[in-house]
Image: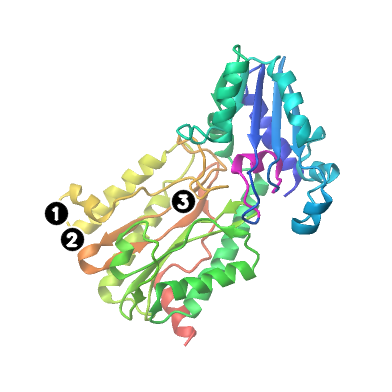
């Protein structure tokens, strides 16, 4: 991605920081997964290398940026590859003041004597042995004047709104996910859940995904009534529906899509009836997504819709019974994480959220969820994943055509 995105990200963070403060964000301790570093670290610099550090200093309302990177090591270069040079890191991040990691302690010591506040990325304050928590304890003891703050509030604020180029990254992840879903449908037949899942795995990797947004859910029959079913080991039988909740990442940015398909290519009348209600529910919620509304309000809109429709088909008698068949929220933010770090305040333009109504009728072995990724605009919303097969007619026609 263009370095100007990361320059803007750091500017936004700097604007939120208090004066006389220091923000320190670490990459990750080891290289174990391709293009998978700390999300907040990547947000600031666009770099995928491990052990590196980003530092932002704010004094007298002037902001200074630094990075600390691995020096070149001939032995490591031969075994795992050479790290990026200072010039390469600058071209990637736009940060000019770059040092090697062995300079970090002396430079940070000088700054800690000057500032009064330190922001650390304390994702899990219960983990007393995380690098950030250990540093917080150490610095509190060594620099009694310092106040330690959790940087999470800064990142929640800035990551809620997406830069146009971030939106393009997510669109690309959605396109790859579409190809993966079509690969599943092209091979759909009575199979084990993990076998059907494997077609998605191969397709997204072949088409350039850099990772998974989260572990794939492939839940057939009654398994689909378990929201976070991940065993993916049962036989998806003819006559069953199978629910897929899946997504990929492209340079860290995620897609998050759910679709529900008939294993044999045809919805039964009852499956079609329930599926249609879920799809209508999604369309109803989409009409209400706009700046100023909250995800909690969107969920209430869906519940009210379900109360009316489920009474009409005789599934429930009272409004309260909706929660027996629908027991999750309709929306969450999406970005560098599938459930993205964000502020759950009234929606703002250029937020990206899910819209994922579902119905789960365990006694009938029917679990249905339909999920799309939605861009909030100035006046409403755009369904970024609208090209992925969704209606009963589209699904049945596609599956008929593969025979």
Residue 401 higher or lower than 17, as above or below: below
Tell me where residue 172 sits by quadrant. bottom right
Q: Tag on residue 354?
A: 3
Q: Tag on residue 315?
A: 2
- How far across and how far down the image is residue 396, in percent? 41, 78
On the image, numbered disc 1 is attached to which residue? 317
Q: Residue at x 58, y 47 (%)?
A: 336
Identify the element where label 1 is drawn. loop
Residue 190 higher or lower than 320, as above or below: below
Q: CA distance from mark 1 to mark 3?
A: 29 Å
- How far across and how far down the image is residue 384, in percent? 54, 56
Q: How is the image coloured?
A: rainbow
N-term mark: 1 or 3 = 1
Tell me where residue 294 sits by quadrant. top left
Front residue (pair 355, 51): 51
N-term mark: 2 or 3 = 2
Q: Which residues are magenta?
A: 35-48
- Disc 3 crowd rating (10 Å Cα; few below 14, some 14-19, many 20+) is many
| Residue 86 colored in magenta in the image | no
Q: Total of numbered circles in the picture?
A: 3
Single out the residue that lies furthest toward the front.
Answer: 75
Q: Tag on residue 335?
A: none
- How far across and how far down the image is residue 314, in percent? 16, 61
Single out the residue that lies furthest toward the top.
Answer: 145
Front residue (pair 105, 319): 105
Q: Residue at x 46, y 62 (%)?
A: 216
Residue 311 visible in the picture: yes
Mark 1 in CB contact with mark 2 (< 8 angstroms): no
- Disc 1 crowd rating (10 Å Cα; few below 14, some 14-19, many 20+) is some
Q: Residue at x 52, y 34 (%)?
A: 129
């Amino acid at each position: 991605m263009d370095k100007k995105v990361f320059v803007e990200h750091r500017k936004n963070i700097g604007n939120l920081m208090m004066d006389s403060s220091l923000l320190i964000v670490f990459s990750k301790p080891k290289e174990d997964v391709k293009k998978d570093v700390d999300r907040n670290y990547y947000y600031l610099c666009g770099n995928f290398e491990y052990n590196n550090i980003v530092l932002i200093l704010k004094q007298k309302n002037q902001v200074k940026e630094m990075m600390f990177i691995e020096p070149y090591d001939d032995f490591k270069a031969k075994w795992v590859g050479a790290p990026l040079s200072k010039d390469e890191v600058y071209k990637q991040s736009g940060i000019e003041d770059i040092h090697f990691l062995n300079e970090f302690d002396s430079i940070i010591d000088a700054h800690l004597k000057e500032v009064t506040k330190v922001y650390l990325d304390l994702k899990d304050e219960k983990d007393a042995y995380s690098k950030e928590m250990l540093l917080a304890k150490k610095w509190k003891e060594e620099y009694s004047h310092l106040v330690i703050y959790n940087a999470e509030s800064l990142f929640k604020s800035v990551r809620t709104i997406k830069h146009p180029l971030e939106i393009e990254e997510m669109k690309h992840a959605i396109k790859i996910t579409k190809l993966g879903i079509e690969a599943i449908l092209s091979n759909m037949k009575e199979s084990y859940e993990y076998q059907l899942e494997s077609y998605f795995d191969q397709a997204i990797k072949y088409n350039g995904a850099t990772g998974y947004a989260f572990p794939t859910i492939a839940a057939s029959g009654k398994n689909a009534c378990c929201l976070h079913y991940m065993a993916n080991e049962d036989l998806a039988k003819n006559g069953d529906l199978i629910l897929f909740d899946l997504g990929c990442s492209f340079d860290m940015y995620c897609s998050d899509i759910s679709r529900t398909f008939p294993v044999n290519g045809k919805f039964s009348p009852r499956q079609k009836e329930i599926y249609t209600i879920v799809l209508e529910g999604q369309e109803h919620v989409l009409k209400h997504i706009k700046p100023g509304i909250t995800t909690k309000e969107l969920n209430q809109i869906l519940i009210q819709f379900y109360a009316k429709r489920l009474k009409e088909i005789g599934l429930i008698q009272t409004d309260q019974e909706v929660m027996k068949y629908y027991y999750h929220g309709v929306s969450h933010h999406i970005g560098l994480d599938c459930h993205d770090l964000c502020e759950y305040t009234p929606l703002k333009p250029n937020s990206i959220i899910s819209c994922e109504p579902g119905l789960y009728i365990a006694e009938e072995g029917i679990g249905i969820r339909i999920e799309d990724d939605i861009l909030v605009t100035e006046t409403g919303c755009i369904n970024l994943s609208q090209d992925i097969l969704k209606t009963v007619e589209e699904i049945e026609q596609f599956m008929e055509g593969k025979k």
